[in-house]
Amino acid sequence: MHVAIAAIETSSIAQGTVAGDAMVKQAEVTLIEACPLSPGKYWVLIGGEVGPVRAAFARGVEVAAETLLDSLFIPQLHAMVVPALRGTPGARDDDALGVIETLTAAAAIIAADRAAKTADVLLRDIRLANGLGGKAFVFLSGEVGDVQAAVDAGRDEAVRKGLLVRSVVVPRLHPQMKERVY
């Protein structure tokens, strides 16, 4: 489990690759993901202890330079974020579904972390850009009031950066939809 994570999202696949390499050369961190994202962006996600992740992140931002589209540094990551990124959330039959849709992968992860830290919800899934036209989204579930509070908190982070597409809360999610989403 990673205490901290950081990521850069660039408009150039070539420069994103160079920045990712610089990040893992800068400090003792774990490279969680390094891959192209639709449409023609590059994504690097690292994890580890706070100090090394901070140093590697600073180097990545510096090397990405003008190609940097978005970034994140979360020093105290909520434990549900990485499992949701991997599509392995815990099992729970919840009443409500919350969705936060963003323009960047980084904005979705920040929204997910903030949502999970705000209320008693389960992060179900975090999808990043590929097959989504470069957008990303978070699915979370819980009791209606908790889901609303979590979605509001996550949405506020994306709005602050001008990267929110839409956020919704679906109370009493139909069993057929639960079968597909949960």
Image (spheres, helix red, strand yellow):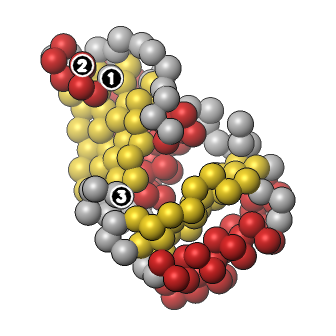
- Expressed as whole percent of the image width and height from the top left, the position of residue 165 reads 25, 56
Q: Is residue 29 visible?
A: yes
Q: Amino acid at mark 1?
A: Tyr
Mark with earlier residue (3, 1): 3
Residue behind mark 3: 129
Q: Quadrant of the N terminus?
A: top right
Give residue 57's mark.
none
Assess whether mark 1 and mark 2 are in contact (beta carbons under 8 angstroms).
Answer: yes
Residue located 48% across and 49% down the image: 109
Q: Is residue 139 or residue 169 the one in the foreground?
A: 139
Q: CA distance from mark 2 to mark 3?
A: 23 Å
- Expressed as whole percent of the image width and height from the top left, the position of residue 142 reads 38, 19
User: In the figure, is residue 169 to the left or right of 56?
Assistant: left
Q: Label 3 crowding class (10 Å Cα cut-off): few <14, some 14-19, many 20+?
A: many
Q: CA distance from mark 3 to mark 1?
A: 20 Å
Q: Amino acid at mark 2?
A: Glu
- Expressed as whole percent of the image width and height from the top left, the position of residue 136 reads 35, 53
Residue behind mark 2: 179
